[in-house]
Amino acid sequence: MNLEKVIFGFFIILAMTLNFGFFVGEIDNPQHHLHYELYIAIVVNLIATVLKFGDRTQIGAIHLATSLVADLQLIAAAIIWVVAGSKGTNPEVIVGVVSLSGGAFLANITSVIILIYETVTLRR
């Protein structure tokens, strides 16, 4: 067992599950989306991105690209929520924030699928 791969897989899957936890719920109901979970998802995604920097393979490049997409969308969602301020509970604002996190969730799913593919095709 490679400890580096365990940590890498842990952060990728944690990022995906946190993003899912924020994304799930009625899209226009701010009570279904906890802003702290969005911020934690951003931090975990950033950690996962940093862990991907050392991999120089083609699959590593795709991992990094999917992680950067997720980071960008989650950060954009947080910026919209912060800029909206008191209007953050407005359904139009929350729909935009949740939609961006949904895009990040899709990028995280892609990253996990690539991780599974890489693990399955690993030669001993």
Image (spheres, grey):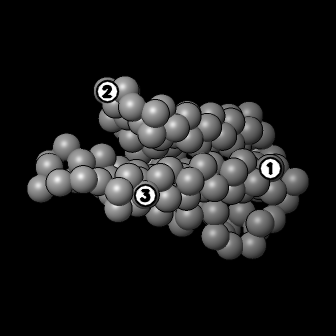
Q: Name the amino acid type tagged 1.
A: Gly
Residue that lies at the very extreme toward the right in this rendered image: 92
**Residue at the (35%, 62%) spot, across then down:** 120
Q: Quadrant of residue 109?
A: bottom right
Q: Which residue is mark 1?
A: 96
Q: Rounded to the nearest whole Å, what is the CA distance between mark 1 and mark 2?
A: 33 Å
* Label 1 or label 3, whichever comes before in sequence order: 1
Q: Which residue is mark 3?
A: 117
Q: Quadrant of residue 27?
A: bottom right
Q: Name the amino acid type tagged 2.
A: Gly
Q: Nearer the viewer, residue 76 or 11?
A: 11
- Secondary structure state at the residue bearing disc 3: helix
- Residue 54's disc is 2
| Vertical placement of residue 118 versus 79, above or below | below
Residue 22 visible (yes or no): yes
Neighbor class of circle 2 (other Cα within 10 Å; few <14, some 14-19, many 20+) is few
